[in-house]
Amino acid sequence: MAGGQRDQGTNDAESRDDVVDERTAVELAYQPQSSDTLVGLRVRERIKRTGLLLRSALLVLGAGQWLLSIIVRGSVDVFSTAVFLLVVLLVWSYPRLQAAQVQRLVGWQGEYRATVSPAGITCRTEHSTLIQKWSVFQGYRETAGHFVLLSRDPNIMCIEVLPKRGVREDGDVERLRAILDQYTPRV
């Protein structure tokens, strides 16, 4: 480099990825709640279908065992009934327990500030910053109160939940939907 000129050719691609156009970016600010995670887990389960299949199979086997014990004994067995009710309780509560665990992991970080732009999604807290490019996601699904983005890996191990309550202006939900539609498909 001569005369104080910089070599700008090496970092142009990186700097363009990090630039956020204020006109197209949508900002959200929200305190994560376990209900947000629960919505994300339900969407993930509907997409994967294996969790739904396993839970259904467990309920059918539990009900079959309970009915079989009634037929064999000729009356309702207290132990079999208690076991069946425990199975139903576990199947019902498992996603809620997962959501509560995630809330313990992320809730202490305070307010989340997410920026959704053509470059991807940037989530900031007082303690961390997470930048995700669109290539991380296989798609998204919209619910009544959330946008749930699903990771590309086969097991959908990561989900990103953007609560609509976090938008700042009235038109931001439509702008957010337009960005998501442009950079990732609906699933």
Image (spheres, grey):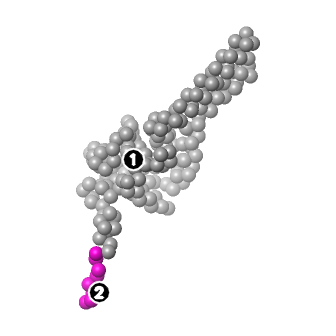
Q: Is residue 21 above or below residue 54?
A: below
Q: Is residue 3 above or below residue 101?
A: below
Q: Does 7 lie within the magenta span? A: yes
Q: Residue 154's x, y, as percent?
A: 47, 46
Q: Is residue 21 above or below residue 141?
A: below
Q: Which mark is residue 1?
A: 2
Q: Does the image show residue 165?
A: no
Name the secondary structure under disc 1. Answer: strand
Which residue lies at the image location 35% right of the left edge and 56% below the top edge? 120
Q: Residue furthest top?
A: 74
Q: Is residue 57 above or below residue 132?
A: above
- Please give the range of residues in magenta: 1-9
Residues packed near mark 1 inside 10 Å, few (<14), some (14 to 19) or many (20 plus)? some
Q: Residue 36's x, y, as percent?
A: 46, 42
Give the residue pinned by disc 1: 138
Dot 2 amino acid type: Met
Q: Residue 39's x, y, as percent?
A: 46, 39
